[in-house]
Protein backbone atom coordinates (compact mmCIF):
# COMPACT_ATOMS: atom_id res chain seq x y z
CA UNK A 1 0.00 0.00 0.00
CA UNK A 2 1.51 3.27 -1.11
CA UNK A 3 0.47 6.90 -1.16
CA UNK A 4 0.20 8.08 -4.76
CA UNK A 5 -0.69 11.45 -6.31
CA UNK A 6 -2.10 11.72 -9.84
CA UNK A 7 -1.79 15.07 -11.62
CA UNK A 8 -3.71 15.47 -14.88
CA UNK A 9 -5.99 18.24 -16.11
CA UNK A 10 -8.00 15.67 -18.03
CA UNK A 11 -10.65 14.54 -15.57
CA UNK A 12 -11.56 11.26 -17.27
CA UNK A 13 -7.95 10.08 -17.32
CA UNK A 14 -7.33 11.26 -13.77
CA UNK A 15 -10.35 9.48 -12.29
CA UNK A 16 -9.63 6.28 -14.16
CA UNK A 17 -6.11 6.04 -12.75
CA UNK A 18 -7.21 7.03 -9.24
CA UNK A 19 -9.91 4.37 -9.23
CA UNK A 20 -7.59 1.70 -10.57
CA UNK A 21 -5.05 2.47 -7.82
CA UNK A 22 -7.69 2.59 -5.10
CA UNK A 23 -8.80 -0.83 -6.33
CA UNK A 24 -5.25 -2.04 -5.72
CA UNK A 25 -5.48 -0.82 -2.11
CA UNK A 26 -3.24 2.18 -2.65
CA UNK A 27 -4.06 5.57 -1.22
CA UNK A 28 -4.61 7.62 -4.39
CA UNK A 29 -5.51 11.30 -4.81
CA UNK A 30 -6.05 13.33 -7.98
CA UNK A 31 -5.12 16.97 -8.67
CA UNK A 32 -5.59 19.03 -11.80
CA UNK A 33 -2.31 20.89 -12.33
CA UNK A 34 1.31 21.28 -11.33
CA UNK A 35 0.73 23.92 -8.67
CA UNK A 36 -1.86 21.82 -6.87
CA UNK A 37 0.47 18.86 -7.17
CA UNK A 38 3.32 20.78 -5.60
CA UNK A 39 1.12 21.85 -2.69
CA UNK A 40 -0.17 18.34 -2.12
CA UNK A 41 3.36 16.91 -2.24
CA UNK A 42 4.59 19.48 0.25
CA UNK A 43 1.73 18.75 2.65
CA UNK A 44 1.62 14.95 2.62
CA UNK A 45 4.38 12.41 2.30
CA UNK A 46 3.66 10.77 -1.02
CA UNK A 47 5.64 7.82 -2.31
CA UNK A 48 4.84 8.33 -5.96
CA UNK A 49 3.59 10.98 -8.38
CA UNK A 50 2.02 10.07 -11.72
CA UNK A 51 1.86 13.27 -13.74
CA UNK A 52 0.84 14.49 -17.14
CA UNK A 53 3.34 16.80 -18.84
CA UNK A 54 1.00 19.22 -20.51
CA UNK A 55 -1.10 20.98 -17.86
CA UNK A 56 -2.20 24.58 -17.35
CA UNK A 57 -0.34 26.64 -14.77
CA UNK A 58 2.76 24.78 -13.76
CA UNK A 59 3.36 22.05 -16.35
CA UNK A 60 4.82 18.62 -15.63
CA UNK A 61 8.37 19.48 -16.65
CA UNK A 62 8.47 22.58 -14.43
CA UNK A 63 7.04 20.51 -11.59
CA UNK A 64 9.78 17.92 -12.05
CA UNK A 65 12.41 20.63 -12.05
CA UNK A 66 11.13 22.12 -8.81
CA UNK A 67 10.97 18.69 -7.16
CA UNK A 68 14.53 18.03 -8.19
CA UNK A 69 15.69 21.40 -6.84
CA UNK A 70 14.02 20.72 -3.51
CA UNK A 71 15.70 17.33 -3.33
CA UNK A 72 12.29 15.71 -2.98
CA UNK A 73 12.35 11.94 -2.52
CA UNK A 74 9.06 11.28 -4.30
CA UNK A 75 9.21 8.90 -7.27
CA UNK A 76 7.76 10.22 -10.53
CA UNK A 77 6.16 8.57 -13.56
CA UNK A 78 5.31 10.96 -16.40
CA UNK A 79 2.59 10.54 -18.99
CA UNK A 80 3.63 11.93 -22.36
CA UNK A 81 1.78 12.57 -25.58
CA UNK A 82 2.21 9.95 -28.26
CA UNK A 83 5.42 10.32 -30.23
CA UNK A 84 7.09 12.90 -28.02
CA UNK A 85 10.17 10.90 -27.19
CA UNK A 86 12.18 14.04 -26.49
CA UNK A 87 10.02 15.11 -23.60
CA UNK A 88 10.21 11.58 -22.19
CA UNK A 89 13.98 11.77 -22.31
CA UNK A 90 14.00 15.21 -20.74
CA UNK A 91 11.73 14.03 -17.95
CA UNK A 92 14.00 11.08 -17.22
CA UNK A 93 16.99 13.38 -17.13
CA UNK A 94 15.15 15.42 -14.50
CA UNK A 95 14.83 12.34 -12.33
CA UNK A 96 11.59 10.69 -13.44
CA UNK A 97 11.65 6.93 -12.87
CA UNK A 98 9.60 6.00 -15.92
CA UNK A 99 7.25 7.32 -18.59
CA UNK A 100 4.08 6.08 -20.28
CA UNK A 101 3.13 7.17 -23.77
CA UNK A 102 -0.49 7.98 -24.39
CA UNK A 103 -2.70 6.29 -25.23
CA UNK A 104 -1.93 3.39 -22.92
CA UNK A 105 -3.99 0.58 -21.48
CA UNK A 106 -4.55 0.94 -17.73
CA UNK A 107 -2.64 -2.29 -17.17
CA UNK A 108 0.49 -0.51 -18.48
CA UNK A 109 0.23 2.15 -15.76
CA UNK A 110 -0.46 -0.54 -13.22
CA UNK A 111 2.75 -2.38 -14.16
CA UNK A 112 4.81 0.83 -14.16
CA UNK A 113 3.52 1.84 -10.73
CA UNK A 114 4.38 -1.56 -9.35
CA UNK A 115 7.90 -1.43 -10.77
CA UNK A 116 8.49 2.13 -9.54
CA UNK A 117 7.33 1.27 -6.01
CA UNK A 118 9.69 -1.70 -5.92
CA UNK A 119 12.58 0.48 -6.97
CA UNK A 120 11.71 3.11 -4.39
CA UNK A 121 11.50 0.66 -1.55
CA UNK A 122 14.86 -0.75 -2.57
CA UNK A 123 16.61 2.62 -2.58
CA UNK A 124 14.99 3.47 0.75
CA UNK A 125 16.20 0.26 2.33
CA UNK A 126 19.68 0.98 1.02
CA UNK A 127 19.52 4.47 2.44
CA UNK A 128 18.47 3.10 5.83
CA UNK A 129 21.29 0.60 5.75
CA UNK A 130 23.71 3.36 4.87
CA UNK A 131 22.45 5.45 7.79
CA UNK A 132 23.07 2.58 10.13
CA UNK A 133 26.52 1.94 8.78
CA UNK A 134 27.49 5.58 9.10
CA UNK A 135 26.96 5.43 12.82
CA UNK A 136 29.64 2.82 12.99
CA UNK A 137 33.27 3.24 12.04
CA UNK A 138 35.03 -0.08 12.49
CA UNK A 139 34.53 -0.88 16.15
CA UNK A 140 33.81 2.76 16.99
CA UNK A 141 30.17 3.69 17.40
CA UNK A 142 28.71 7.19 17.28
CA UNK A 143 26.17 9.13 15.28
CA UNK A 144 26.73 12.44 17.07
CA UNK A 145 28.35 15.26 15.09
CA UNK A 146 31.42 15.20 17.34
CA UNK A 147 31.99 11.49 16.70
CA UNK A 148 31.30 11.90 12.99
CA UNK A 149 34.09 14.48 12.92
CA UNK A 150 36.39 12.00 14.65
CA UNK A 151 35.55 9.37 11.99
CA UNK A 152 36.26 11.81 9.17
CA UNK A 153 39.59 12.79 10.67
CA UNK A 154 40.63 9.15 11.13
CA UNK A 155 39.67 8.40 7.53
CA UNK A 156 41.77 11.32 6.31
CA UNK A 157 44.95 10.70 8.27
CA UNK A 158 45.01 6.89 8.27
CA UNK A 159 46.64 6.93 4.83
CA UNK A 160 49.66 8.88 6.10
CA UNK A 161 52.50 8.24 8.55
CA UNK A 162 51.96 11.54 10.35
CA UNK A 163 52.08 11.16 14.14
CA UNK A 164 48.67 11.39 15.81
CA UNK A 165 47.92 12.37 19.39
CA UNK A 166 44.62 11.07 20.77
CA UNK A 167 43.31 13.08 23.70
CA UNK A 168 40.33 12.34 25.90
CA UNK A 169 39.09 11.28 29.29
CA UNK A 170 39.41 7.72 30.46
CA UNK A 171 37.14 5.29 28.63
CA UNK A 172 36.35 7.53 25.65
CA UNK A 173 37.81 5.09 23.12
CA UNK A 174 41.35 6.38 22.58
CA UNK A 175 42.76 2.92 22.06
CA UNK A 176 39.99 2.05 19.61
CA UNK A 177 40.98 5.12 17.58
CA UNK A 178 44.60 4.00 17.47
CA UNK A 179 43.56 0.55 16.28
CA UNK A 180 41.25 2.02 13.66
CA UNK A 181 44.03 4.29 12.37
CA UNK A 182 46.17 1.21 11.92
CA UNK A 183 43.46 -0.98 10.43
CA UNK A 184 42.66 1.58 7.73
CA UNK A 185 46.26 2.39 6.89
CA UNK A 186 48.43 0.93 4.14
CA UNK A 187 50.37 -0.75 6.99
CA UNK A 188 47.33 -2.71 8.20
CA UNK A 189 49.11 -6.00 7.46
CA UNK A 190 52.03 -4.93 9.61
CA UNK A 191 52.13 -5.20 13.41
CA UNK A 192 50.13 -3.04 15.83
CA UNK A 193 52.12 -2.78 19.03
CA UNK A 194 50.95 -1.15 22.25
CA UNK A 195 53.16 0.16 25.04
CA UNK A 196 51.61 1.45 28.23
CA UNK A 197 54.12 4.09 29.21
CA UNK A 198 52.75 4.39 32.76
CA UNK A 199 53.19 0.72 33.58
CA UNK A 200 57.00 0.51 33.57
CA UNK A 201 59.73 2.01 35.71
CA UNK A 202 62.04 4.49 34.02
CA UNK A 203 64.93 2.22 32.96
CA UNK A 204 62.63 -0.59 31.98
CA UNK A 205 60.51 1.58 29.71
CA UNK A 206 63.52 2.69 27.74
CA UNK A 207 64.70 -0.85 27.05
CA UNK A 208 61.12 -1.92 26.39
CA UNK A 209 60.83 0.74 23.69
CA UNK A 210 64.28 0.64 22.17
CA UNK A 211 65.58 -2.80 23.11
CA UNK A 212 69.00 -3.48 24.54
CA UNK A 213 72.31 -5.09 23.66
CA UNK A 214 73.81 -7.95 25.61
CA UNK A 215 75.50 -6.69 28.78
CA UNK A 216 73.84 -3.27 28.60
CA UNK A 217 72.88 -3.64 32.25
CA UNK A 218 72.99 -6.26 34.93
CA UNK A 219 70.76 -9.08 33.85
CA UNK A 220 70.89 -8.24 30.15
CA UNK A 221 72.30 -11.65 29.25
CA UNK A 222 70.99 -11.48 25.72
CA UNK A 223 70.32 -8.68 23.31
CA UNK A 224 66.65 -7.93 22.79
CA UNK A 225 64.60 -6.05 20.24
CA UNK A 226 62.48 -3.17 21.51
CA UNK A 227 58.90 -2.36 20.58
CA UNK A 228 60.05 0.11 17.93
CA UNK A 229 61.84 -2.63 16.05
CA UNK A 230 58.95 -5.02 16.57
CA UNK A 231 56.55 -2.44 15.15
CA UNK A 232 58.61 -2.09 11.94
CA UNK A 233 56.27 -1.42 8.99
CA UNK A 234 53.39 -1.16 11.43
CA UNK A 235 52.01 1.14 14.10
CA UNK A 236 53.34 1.78 17.60
CA UNK A 237 50.71 2.95 20.07
CA UNK A 238 52.22 4.81 23.03
CA UNK A 239 49.44 4.87 25.61
CA UNK A 240 49.62 7.30 28.53
CA UNK A 241 52.44 9.10 26.76
CA UNK A 242 52.31 11.87 29.38
CA UNK A 243 53.97 9.51 31.85
CA UNK A 244 57.20 9.01 29.88
CA UNK A 245 60.24 10.06 31.96
CA UNK A 246 62.21 13.03 30.63
CA UNK A 247 65.30 10.99 29.71
CA UNK A 248 63.23 8.64 27.55
CA UNK A 249 61.44 11.63 26.02
CA UNK A 250 64.76 12.76 24.56
CA UNK A 251 65.26 9.40 22.84
CA UNK A 252 61.71 9.41 21.55
CA UNK A 253 62.14 12.91 20.14
CA UNK A 254 65.30 11.83 18.37
CA UNK A 255 63.56 8.89 16.82
CA UNK A 256 60.73 11.07 15.54
CA UNK A 257 63.23 13.45 13.97
CA UNK A 258 65.69 10.95 12.51
CA UNK A 259 63.57 7.78 12.10
CA UNK A 260 66.54 5.97 13.61
CA UNK A 261 67.28 4.64 17.07
CA UNK A 262 69.89 2.80 19.10
CA UNK A 263 69.30 -0.07 21.46
CA UNK A 264 70.21 0.58 25.11
CA UNK A 265 73.94 -0.10 25.53
CA UNK A 266 74.45 -0.20 21.79
CA UNK A 267 75.95 2.22 19.30
CA UNK A 268 74.53 0.87 16.10
CA UNK A 269 71.89 3.09 14.48
CA UNK A 270 68.86 1.08 13.48
CA UNK A 271 66.40 2.40 10.90
CA UNK A 272 62.77 1.52 11.51
CA UNK A 273 59.63 2.46 9.65
CA UNK A 274 57.00 3.02 12.31
CA UNK A 275 53.91 5.14 12.54
CA UNK A 276 53.57 6.52 16.06
CA UNK A 277 50.17 7.12 17.65
CA UNK A 278 50.16 8.53 21.18
CA UNK A 279 47.34 8.88 23.69
CA UNK A 280 46.85 10.49 27.05
CA UNK A 281 44.08 11.57 29.38
CA UNK A 282 46.41 14.15 30.95
CA UNK A 283 46.48 17.84 30.17
CA UNK A 284 49.79 17.94 28.30
CA UNK A 285 50.02 21.73 28.37
CA UNK A 286 50.03 21.55 32.18
CA UNK A 287 52.70 18.85 32.13
CA UNK A 288 54.80 21.12 29.93
CA UNK A 289 54.31 24.07 32.27
CA UNK A 290 55.38 21.84 35.19
CA UNK A 291 58.52 20.84 33.30
CA UNK A 292 57.45 17.21 33.11
CA UNK A 293 56.94 17.03 29.36
CA UNK A 294 59.20 18.44 26.67
CA UNK A 295 57.53 21.06 24.55
CA UNK A 296 59.53 20.09 21.43
CA UNK A 297 58.39 16.48 21.82
CA UNK A 298 54.81 17.64 22.23
CA UNK A 299 54.92 19.39 18.85
CA UNK A 300 56.42 16.29 17.25
CA UNK A 301 53.77 13.86 18.49
CA UNK A 302 50.92 16.31 18.12
CA UNK A 303 50.94 16.96 14.38
CA UNK A 304 47.33 15.76 14.24
CA UNK A 305 45.11 15.81 17.32
CA UNK A 306 42.06 13.61 17.68
CA UNK A 307 39.96 14.78 20.60
CA UNK A 308 37.54 12.21 21.96
CA UNK A 309 34.38 13.84 23.30
CA UNK A 310 33.22 12.69 26.73
CA UNK A 311 30.01 10.64 26.70
CA UNK A 312 28.03 13.28 28.63
CA UNK A 313 28.60 15.68 25.71
CA UNK A 314 27.14 13.30 23.16
CA UNK A 315 24.19 11.78 24.98
CA UNK A 316 22.35 11.13 21.73
CA UNK A 317 24.82 8.27 21.20
CA UNK A 318 23.80 6.51 24.41
CA UNK A 319 20.89 4.44 22.97
CA UNK A 320 23.06 3.44 20.03
CA UNK A 321 25.94 2.42 22.29
CA UNK A 322 23.62 0.53 24.63
CA UNK A 323 22.25 -1.47 21.75
CA UNK A 324 25.70 -2.26 20.35
CA UNK A 325 27.26 -3.07 23.71
CA UNK A 326 24.36 -5.38 24.65
CA UNK A 327 24.65 -7.13 21.31
CA UNK A 328 28.40 -7.54 21.76
CA UNK A 329 27.86 -8.85 25.27
CA UNK A 330 25.19 -11.30 24.11
CA UNK A 331 27.56 -12.62 21.45
CA UNK A 332 30.22 -13.23 24.11
CA UNK A 333 28.12 -14.60 26.94
CA UNK A 334 24.75 -15.58 25.51
CA UNK A 335 23.05 -13.21 27.99
CA UNK A 336 20.37 -11.35 26.03
CA UNK A 337 19.03 -8.12 27.37
CA UNK A 338 17.24 -4.84 26.76
CA UNK A 339 17.09 -1.59 28.71
CA UNK A 340 13.72 -0.35 30.00
CA UNK A 341 12.80 3.29 29.64
CA UNK A 342 13.32 4.21 33.27
CA UNK A 343 16.91 2.97 33.08
CA UNK A 344 17.49 4.65 29.71
CA UNK A 345 16.24 7.94 31.13
CA UNK A 346 18.65 7.65 34.03
CA UNK A 347 21.46 7.01 31.55
CA UNK A 348 20.50 10.26 29.84
CA UNK A 349 21.02 12.36 32.96
CA UNK A 350 24.01 10.60 34.54
CA UNK A 351 27.43 12.24 34.19
CA UNK A 352 29.43 9.18 33.03
CA UNK A 353 32.87 10.11 34.44
CA UNK A 354 34.17 6.75 33.13
CA UNK A 355 32.56 7.29 29.72
CA UNK A 356 31.90 4.34 27.40
CA UNK A 357 33.90 1.93 29.53
CA UNK A 358 31.70 2.78 32.52
CA UNK A 359 28.56 2.30 30.43
CA UNK A 360 29.89 -1.08 29.37
CA UNK A 361 30.52 -2.10 32.99
CA UNK A 362 27.16 -0.82 34.20
CA UNK A 363 25.33 -2.83 31.53
CA UNK A 364 27.30 -5.95 32.25
CA UNK A 365 26.58 -5.76 35.98
CA UNK A 366 22.91 -4.85 35.49
CA UNK A 367 22.38 -7.80 33.16
CA UNK A 368 23.36 -10.15 35.95
CA UNK A 369 20.92 -8.51 38.36
CA UNK A 370 18.02 -7.97 35.95
CA UNK A 371 14.92 -10.14 36.04
CA UNK A 372 14.70 -12.67 33.27
CA UNK A 373 11.45 -12.88 31.31
CA UNK A 374 9.88 -16.15 30.20
CA UNK A 375 12.16 -16.24 27.13
CA UNK A 376 15.24 -15.85 29.31
CA UNK A 377 15.53 -12.32 27.96
CA UNK A 378 16.67 -9.86 30.65
CA UNK A 379 15.16 -6.43 31.00
CA UNK A 380 17.37 -3.91 32.76
CA UNK A 381 15.39 -1.42 34.81
CA UNK A 382 16.36 1.42 37.14
CA UNK A 383 16.56 -0.83 40.17
CA UNK A 384 19.36 -2.87 38.58
CA UNK A 385 21.62 0.15 38.29
CA UNK A 386 24.28 1.27 40.78
CA UNK A 387 23.20 3.81 43.42
CA UNK A 388 25.07 6.71 41.82
CA UNK A 389 23.04 6.30 38.65
CA UNK A 390 19.75 5.56 40.41
CA UNK A 391 19.95 8.98 42.01
CA UNK A 392 20.41 8.23 45.71
CA UNK A 393 21.94 10.62 48.22
CA UNK A 394 25.05 11.52 46.28
CA UNK A 395 23.27 12.01 42.97
CA UNK A 396 22.95 15.42 41.31
CA UNK A 397 19.77 17.40 41.98
CA UNK A 398 18.46 17.06 38.43
CA UNK A 399 18.61 13.32 38.77
CA UNK A 400 16.68 13.24 42.07
CA UNK A 401 14.05 15.56 40.67
CA UNK A 402 13.61 13.25 37.76
CA UNK A 403 13.21 10.24 40.03
CA UNK A 404 10.40 11.97 41.87
CA UNK A 405 8.55 12.65 38.65
CA UNK A 406 9.11 9.19 37.25
CA UNK A 407 5.49 8.11 37.59
CA UNK A 408 5.14 10.18 34.44
CA UNK A 409 7.69 8.18 32.52
CA UNK A 410 5.75 4.94 33.05
CA UNK A 411 2.77 6.56 31.49
CA UNK A 412 4.73 7.94 28.55
CA UNK A 413 6.26 4.53 28.02
CA UNK A 414 2.85 2.86 27.82
CA UNK A 415 1.58 5.46 25.37
CA UNK A 416 4.66 5.19 23.17
CA UNK A 417 4.35 1.42 23.07
CA UNK A 418 0.75 1.67 21.95
CA UNK A 419 1.54 4.18 19.19
CA UNK A 420 4.27 1.96 17.83
CA UNK A 421 2.12 -1.16 18.03
CA UNK A 422 -0.65 0.54 16.06
CA UNK A 423 1.72 1.73 13.35
CA UNK A 424 3.11 -1.78 12.99
CA UNK A 425 -0.33 -3.34 12.69
CA UNK A 426 -1.29 -0.72 10.14
CA UNK A 427 1.85 -1.46 8.12
CA UNK A 428 1.14 -5.19 8.41
CA UNK A 429 4.37 -5.47 10.40
CA UNK A 430 6.42 -4.13 7.52
CA UNK A 431 9.11 -2.35 9.56
CA UNK A 432 10.25 -0.04 6.79
CA UNK A 433 6.71 1.26 6.30
CA UNK A 434 6.00 1.55 10.01
CA UNK A 435 9.27 3.39 10.59
CA UNK A 436 8.38 5.80 7.83
CA UNK A 437 4.92 6.43 9.24
CA UNK A 438 6.43 7.11 12.67
CA UNK A 439 9.26 9.28 11.26
CA UNK A 440 11.74 6.94 12.90
CA UNK A 441 14.85 5.35 11.51
CA UNK A 442 14.31 1.67 11.01
CA UNK A 443 17.10 0.91 13.48
CA UNK A 444 15.35 3.03 16.11
CA UNK A 445 12.06 1.29 15.43
CA UNK A 446 13.75 -2.07 15.87
CA UNK A 447 15.31 -0.89 19.09
CA UNK A 448 11.93 0.18 20.43
CA UNK A 449 10.25 -3.03 19.26
CA UNK A 450 12.80 -4.96 21.24
CA UNK A 451 12.39 -2.70 24.22
CA UNK A 452 8.62 -3.01 24.26
CA UNK A 453 8.73 -6.66 23.27
CA UNK A 454 6.63 -6.00 20.20
CA UNK A 455 6.59 -8.91 17.79
CA UNK A 456 4.58 -9.84 14.75
CA UNK A 457 1.99 -12.32 16.03
CA UNK A 458 2.56 -15.91 14.88
CA UNK A 459 0.63 -16.82 11.74
CA UNK A 460 -2.21 -19.19 12.54
N1 LIG B 1 32.81 4.93 20.43
C1 LIG B 1 32.83 3.71 20.96
N2 LIG B 1 32.12 2.73 20.41
C2 LIG B 1 32.13 1.48 20.93
N3 LIG B 1 32.83 1.11 21.99
C3 LIG B 1 33.57 2.05 22.59
C4 LIG B 1 33.62 3.39 22.10
N4 LIG B 1 34.44 4.09 22.89
C5 LIG B 1 34.89 3.23 23.82
N5 LIG B 1 34.39 2.00 23.65
C6 LIG B 1 34.64 0.83 24.50
O1 LIG B 1 34.92 1.32 25.80
C7 LIG B 1 36.05 0.67 26.35
C8 LIG B 1 37.14 1.69 26.60
O2 LIG B 1 37.71 2.11 25.37
P1 LIG B 1 39.27 2.43 25.24
O3 LIG B 1 40.08 1.42 25.97
O4 LIG B 1 39.58 2.64 23.81
O5 LIG B 1 39.29 3.81 26.04
P2 LIG B 1 40.51 4.74 26.42
O6 LIG B 1 40.15 6.10 26.00
O7 LIG B 1 41.77 4.14 25.88
O8 LIG B 1 40.48 4.67 28.00
P3 LIG B 1 41.71 4.85 29.08
O9 LIG B 1 42.13 6.28 29.02
O10 LIG B 1 41.06 4.51 30.36
O11 LIG B 1 42.76 3.89 28.65
C9 LIG B 1 36.45 -0.39 25.39
O12 LIG B 1 35.87 -1.62 25.79
C10 LIG B 1 35.88 0.05 24.08
O13 LIG B 1 35.54 -1.05 23.28
MG1 LIG C 1 43.37 3.26 26.90
Image: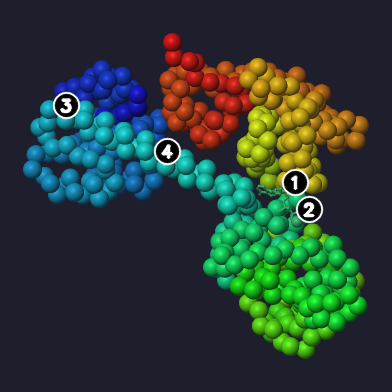
In the structure shown, which secondary structural element does the residue marked by tag 3 occupy?
A: helix
Q: Is residue 319 visible?
A: no
Quarter of the image for the N terminus: give it: top left
92, above or below 233, in the image: above
Q: CA distance from mark 3 to mark 2?
A: 64 Å
Q: Nearer the viewer, mark 3 or mark 2?
A: 2
* 427, 173: nearer the viewer: 173
The residue positioned 31% from the left and 19% from the top of the image is: 25
Q: Earlier in the sequence, mark 3 or mark 1?
A: 3
In the structure shown, which secondary structural element does the residue marked by tag 1 occupy?
A: helix
Q: Name the residue at the top extreme.
A: 460
Residue indicated by mark 4: 125
* 16, 278: nearer the viewer: 278
The residue positioned 19% from the left and 22% from the top of the image is: 16
Q: Earlier in the sequence, mark 2 or mark 4?
A: 4
Residue indicated by mark 3: 107
The residue positioned 89% from the left and 75% from the top of the image is: 219
392, above or below 72, in the image: above
Q: CA distance from mark 1 to mark 2?
A: 8 Å
Residue indicated by mark 1: 357
Residue indicated by mark 2: 170
* 225, 256: nearer the viewer: 225
Confirm or reject: label 2 Cβ below 8 Å from ligand 1: yes
Q: CA distance from mark 1 to mark 4?
A: 33 Å
In the structure shown, which secondary structural element does the residue marked by tag 4 occupy?
A: helix
Amino acid sequence: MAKILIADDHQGMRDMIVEMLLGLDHEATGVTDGLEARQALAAGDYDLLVTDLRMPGLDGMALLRSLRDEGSGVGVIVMTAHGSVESAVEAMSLGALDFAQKPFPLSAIEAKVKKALERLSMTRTNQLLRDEINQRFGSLIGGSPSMQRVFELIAKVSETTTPVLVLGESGTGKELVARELHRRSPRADGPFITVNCAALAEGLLESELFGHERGAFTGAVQSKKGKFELAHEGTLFLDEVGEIPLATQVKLLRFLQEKEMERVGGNRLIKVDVRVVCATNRNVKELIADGRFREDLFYRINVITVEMPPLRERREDIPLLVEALLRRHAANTGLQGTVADDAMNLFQIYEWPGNVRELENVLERALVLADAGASGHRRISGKDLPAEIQGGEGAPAAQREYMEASGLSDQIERIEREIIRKALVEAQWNQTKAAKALHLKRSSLQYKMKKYELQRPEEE
